[in-house]
Image: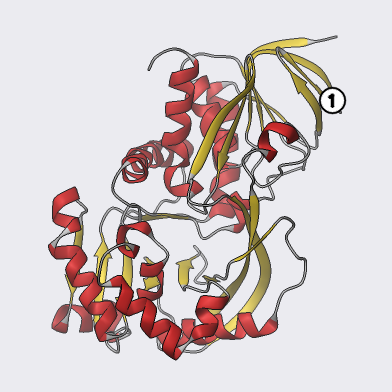
Amino acid sequence: MTRHSDMLIIGAGILGLSHAYAAAKRGLRVRVFERSATPLGASVRNFGQALVTGQPPGIMLELARASREIWGDWAQLAGLQLKRNGSYLFARSEAEEHLLQAFCNGRAVEHGYRVELLRGAALNDLYGGQFRHHRAALHGLDDQQLYSREAIPALIEYLRRDLGVEFHFSTLVRDIEPGQLHSTAGTFRGTQIVLCSGHDYQTLLAEPLARLEPQICRLQMLRARPQVDLKLQHALLTGLSCVHYGAFSDLPQAAAVQAQILAQAPHLHEHGIHLLISPTPYGELIIGDSHDYGRDPSPFNAEQVDDWMIELAEQTLGCKVQVLERWQGVYGARGQQPFSFLQAAPGVHASLMHTGVGMSVGPAMAESNIARLLGES
């Protein structure tokens, strides 16, 4: 027996849940299908950083700003523990400091990034002087941080409880066609079907997805306890991130930072290592990450890569850390295109992120997609 809904969504990561929210708040009947008993993909393996500051001017910055407002709504509606006090990006060298200063003087003013550059006494006072060994710190005032392992389940519970979204966990969707999908829980009918499959490009809609020439990015990540009670309440980055994030990477001053990395630490460039640190609610830190691209993610981690990340973290934090847990992050990737929303057949669509910023832009991206499907824009 088939069961009919207005929208069937495959995948309960941040993109799937964001599409479910955008549809259900409009009064649509929504079902979400997830192959595992709880989400296990990119959305729960990440740092929980929803960054505005790192996004390049244009559509990504617009989506990040709109997503920030949605996260604020979710914090109220679903009881998420959302830190809204921003991030700190530390300049460790003169080249990194010049890049941050140039960003503040130019692009930040032109495009309205809410930032402040801390030096001297302001930097020395930060966390009781714990970070005084840096040259400067860019405070991104609009950046947010949450604990993904708890935030994603809390969002699922809110969608189920308050918006009537029906979830089918431990359910593999075998096939989709216009108007219906076939799964291990039976056949379901729906006016619109949206595939939010993360880095799985082969189970469903393999042929149209293959035309995107996608890759998979694998990241080595750690959870650690600092030996000093930092009581950290902000996401942390360093100047290494400036050559990875579009808000900074195309500025003329970024060339000197990149040249410095290649001259002094070419292994960081080779393995795509740039330090990110996020606090958990339990005094621990999520530390990463590296970037390894290919058609299939290797299951084998390199201990040397972890050692380099730990060294960077201890230099940044000014203290030793004890590693508690190691894992692989993963997300889909494709060239320079940050995301895709494609129609594979009438009423059958795929929504895909091709970078690791789904938490930063996914909520607003889904809002735009649903509005388009419903003819609102």
Where is residue 207 drawn, in percent x and y?
Answer: 73, 33
Q: In x, y percent, where is residue 5?
A: 66, 13
> As drawn, is 135 to the left or to the right of 63?
left
Q: Give the residue drawn at x 33%, y 53%.
A: 84
Left-right relation of 128 to 261: left
Quarter of the image where the N terminus is located: top right
At label 1, counting other C-alpha atoms closer than 10 Å, the crowd grade (few under 14, some 14-19, many 20 or more) is few
Is residue 226 visible to the viewer in this orientation of the structure? no
Question: Which image quadrant is residue 240 in?
Answer: bottom left
Relative to residue 85, is residue 131 depicted above or below? below
The answer to whether residue 145 shows anywhere in this view is yes
- Which of the two residues, 321 or 197, is positioned nearer the viewer here? 197
- Which residue is denoted by mark 1 in the rendering? 185
Quadrant location, the C terminus = top left
Looking at the image, is 304 positioned above or below residue 186?
A: below
User: What colour scheme governs how the chains and residues are painted in the rendered image of this protein?
Assistant: secondary structure
Helix, strand or loop under label 1:
loop
Residue name at image x 50 percent, y 77 percent: 269
As shown in the figure, which amino acid type bears the numbered disc 1? Ala
Residue at image location 71% in from the left, 14% down from the top: 178
Residue 4 position by quadrant? top right
